[in-house]
Amino acid sequence: MKCWINTIFDTKRDNINVSEMCRQLGITRAYWYKILKSESEPTVTLAIRITSYLNECLAQNGYSANMYSVEDLWTE
């Protein structure tokens, strides 16, 4: 699967603290970066949790809630 998170999100612009996000999701930063590079595929459950977390960050910045779906962030 191809990960599109880097093309959609900008951690600085969207105020996403990668360390905090990884702690909340229970993953390492190394694993996070492997996901971003499409070197590792998250489980379905983790993909849903990542999507929810990123959508929550956007909502806190004034964007609409649930702006992106799992299918927006990963494609085959």
Image (spheres, rainbow, N blue to C red):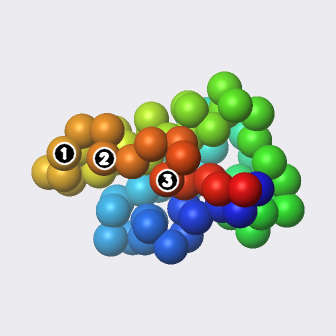
Say whether residue 23 is visible.
no
**Can residue 19 be seen by looking at this rendering?**
yes
Numbered badge on residue 72: 3
Instruction: Please state which amino acid type lies under the numbered disc 1.
Output: Ser
Instruction: List x then y, in percent, for residue 72.
Output: 49, 53
Indicate the position of residue 73 as horizontal and vertical percent values: 54, 54
- Is disc 1 in contact with disc 2, using a CB cutoff of under 8 Å? yes
Quadrant holding the C terminus: bottom right
Residue at 80% across, 48% down: 41
Separation of marks 1 and 3 at Cα, in angstroms: 15 Å
Q: Which residue is at a point 44% across and 65% down the rendered structure image? A: 9
Pick the residue in front: 70 or 16.
70
- Is residue 40 toward the left or the right of residue 59 in the image? right
The image's mark for residue 64 is 1
Q: Is residue 16 above or below residue 68?
A: below
Identify the residue at the far front of this view. 76
Whether residues under marks 3 and 2 lie with C-beta atoms below 8 angstroms apart, the answer is no
Of 69 and 59, which appears nearest the observer?
Answer: 69
Sequence order check, earlier mark of 3 and 2: 2
Q: Which residue is mark 2?
A: 67
Q: Nearer the viewer, residue 10 or 22?
A: 10
Q: Secondary structure at mark 2?
A: loop
Q: CA distance from mark 3 to mark 2?
A: 10 Å
Q: Amino acid at mark 2?
A: Met
